[in-house]
Image (tube, rainbow, N blue to C red):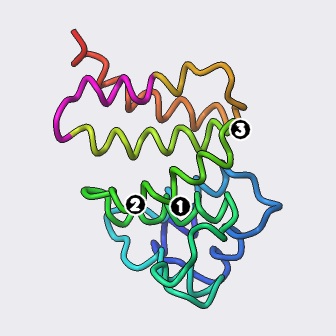
Amino acid sequence: MKAEQLGTMSPEFADFLHSRINAIDLKAALINALGWEKVSGNTEKYCMYIFNKTPDELDIDELGAEDLFVIGYLSAMENYHNPNESLEFLKKAKKKLSKSYTVNIIYSLVKSQIAMEKDFCSVWKIYNKVDNNKKLNHDMRLYAEKIILDYMYLYKDFCK
């Protein structure tokens, strides 16, 4: 609730997102709560709080998987209508956390956002492929999965 109200990165939120103790789905929930409508500079603030560097100054190959995920998802939320830059971080996070449903589903949502410009059916297909992947560790709360499914299900009708 605090993240939703503030809508901006704080040292407290950055510490939560960086901590290896906190579950990846809770990190995704916090990023989601920060929102995308009023988001500005959260990626840079996170990087400055945690690494004392801007995102451009970071060596992406030296970042841990969860930091890659956090930076990628923050960036995607900040650039909701143009999330291409976030994919580099999310793709590397997905490679390192290949069995994580949370990481894979967020990656698919960002890919779907890009696909939305051309074909709504592909939005559903990208999401559905991940959602039906039985090899993934379902490390996301069921209610969160349902929220995503309910939203993405709207795109299924475009596949007829």
Identified by mark 1, the residue type is: Ile
Identified by mark 2, the residue type is: Met
Q: Residue 113: image x %, image y %? A: 31, 44
Q: What is the CA distance from the residue labelled 3 to the residue labelled 2?
A: 21 Å
| Relative side of 139 to 144, left or right | right
Q: Nearer the viewer, residue 54 or 149?
A: 54
Q: Quadrant of residue 127?
A: top left
Q: Quadrant of residue 13?
A: bottom right
The residue pinned by badge 2 equals 77
Q: Residue 37: image x %, image y %? A: 31, 64
Image disc number at residue 139? 3
What residue is rendered at 70% in x and 70% in y?
18
Identified by mark 3, the residue type is: Asp
Q: Quadrant of residue 68?
A: bottom right
96 up-or-down from 41: above or below: above
**Label 1 Cα neighbours within 10 Å, binned few <14 / some 14-19 / many ≥20:** many
Q: Is residue 72 magenta?
A: no
What residue is rendered at 39% in x and 46% in y?
110
Magenta segment: 117-128
Q: Secondary structure at mark 2?
A: helix
The answer to whether residue 140 shows anywhere in this view is: no
Q: Nearer the viewer, residue 85 or 139?
A: 85
**Label 3 Cα neighbours within 10 Å, binned few <14 / some 14-19 / many ≥20:** some
Q: Residue 78: image x %, image y %? A: 37, 66
Q: Nearer the viewer, residue 34 or 129?
A: 129
Q: What is the CA distance from the residue labelled 2 to the residue labelled 1?
A: 8 Å
Name which of mark 1 and mark 3 comes first in the sequence.
1
What residue is rendered at 63% in x and 36% in y?
101
